[in-house]
Image (cartoon, rainbow, N blue to C red):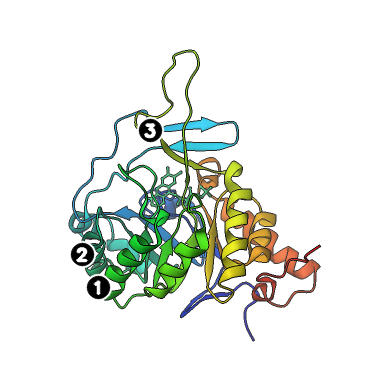
Amino acid sequence: MIDPLSVALGPVILDSPLVGASGTLGSIVEFRRTVDMSRYGAVTAKSVAPEPWPGRVPPRMATTDAGMLNGIGIQNPGIDVWIEEVSEPFRDMVVPVWGSVVAHDPAGFGEVAAKMPAAGVSGIEINLSCPNLDGRPFALDADVTGDVVDAVRSATDLPIGAKLSGDAMPISAVAYAAMSAGADWLVIANTLMGAAIDVRTRRPALSGLIGGYSGTGIRPIIVRCVLEVARDLPDVPIVACGGVSHSDHVIEYILAGADAVAIGTAHFQRPRIADKILKGVARYLKDNDIESIRSLKGAYEPW
Ligand SMILES: Cc1cc2nc3c(=O)[nH]c(=O)nc-3n(C[C@H](O)[C@H](O)[C@H](O)COP(=O)(O)O)c2cc1C
C-alpha cells in the first residue's frame, strides 16, 4: 500500500510532498537544529557555483505588501569549499538533501554537478532561473535551458530537477526543452523578477535595482504556470514553488498538476511551518476520503 503522503518525481520517491526551497533554509545544518526535518520529502541547499561568489552589496532584501524582494546575488563559497565546510552533515540527515547548481555558462553548471556527489546529496536542482544575476535568467530561453540541462545530465547520474522561471513565456516551451535534455522533474518556479522604489528616499529597495519577488503575491502566477505545463506536458513530474504558507496552497498546486510542493519565503516568518502544513494536508486527505495524494494530481474540476 502506498503511504497517503508519499509522492513520486520520476525515479525519486519522497515520503512527504513538501520540499524545502533553495536559499530559504540557511545552510540546512542550522535549520535542522530547530526544525523537524522529517516533515519534508527533500530539502534543497542554497545554490552553489564553480567558484566563490560574493553576492550583491546591501540592501538586498526588502518586504512588500504581499511577499518580499531579494537581490542576494547567490552569495556562496564555491563548490570546493562548500563540499568541505558545509555539506558534511548532509549524509546523516533524516531527509534527502538536494544540491543546487548555478553558474554563468553550461560548462560551469556541469563542473559543479560533477562534484556534487562528494557532498552526499541525493539529487540536484539546476538553478536556471535566478533573477539576481547580471543578464537574463537562462530559463527565459528554451535553447539555452536545453544546453544547461544537457551539460548537467552529462556530468552526473544523480536525478536532476530543472528550476524554471515564472517569467518565461511560454513556459511550456522551456519545460519541454529541459525535459528533452534529460531533467527528471521540473521545479516551477524560482522568484519572479521584481523591483520597488521608496518614494521618500527615491532609492530602489535593492542595490541591484531588479531582484526576485517571492511569497504570497506570486502564487496565482505560479499556479497558472503549473496549469500550463501540466496541460502541455501531462506526464512531467512537477515540484510547484511559490507563495505556499498553508496546506490549502499545497492541495491547490497538486490539483493544478504538481506532484510535490516547495516552501520558501514562509520559512522566514515561521521556520517550523512545514509541520502545520503537512498536518493540514493529511487532514484534507482524511476528511475527503482520499487514499493517496497522488490521485489529486491535475484533478481540478473544470467549469
Ligand atoms: C532570500 C532568498 C534566497 C533564495 N536563494 C535561492 C537560491 O540560492 N537558489 C534557488 O534556486 N532559489 C533561491 N530562492 C528562490 C526560492 O527557492 C523559491 O523558488 C522562491 O522564493 C519562490 O518560492 P516562495 O514564494 O515560497 O518563496 C531564494 C529565495 C529567497 C527569498
Question: Which residue is disc 1 drawn over?
Answer: 155
Quadrant of the drawing holding the C terminus: bottom right
Residue ID at (30%, 42%): 134
The type of residue carrying mark 2 is: Glu
Closer to the camera: disc 1 or disc 3?
Answer: 1
- Residue occupying image coordinates x 39% and y 65%: 97
Label 2 environment density (alpha carbons within 10 Å; few <14, some 14–19, many ≥20): many
Few, some or many C-alpha atoms within 10 Å of disc 3 (few <14, some 14-19, many ≥20)? many
Residue at 27 percent of width and 62 percent of height: 88
Identify the secondary structure beneath mark 2.
helix
Secondary structure of residue under mark 3 = loop
Q: Percent x, y for residue 91?
A: 33, 69
Q: Is mark 1 within 8 Å of ligand 1?
A: no
Residue that carries the numbered disc 2 in the rendered image: 111
Question: What separation in Å lies between label 1 and label 3 (alpha carbons)?
Answer: 33 Å
> Would you place residue 294 above or below residue 211 in this image?
below
Residue 60's disc is 3
Looking at the image, which is closer to me, 289 or 126?
A: 126
Circles 2 and 3 in contact, beta carbons < 8 Å = no
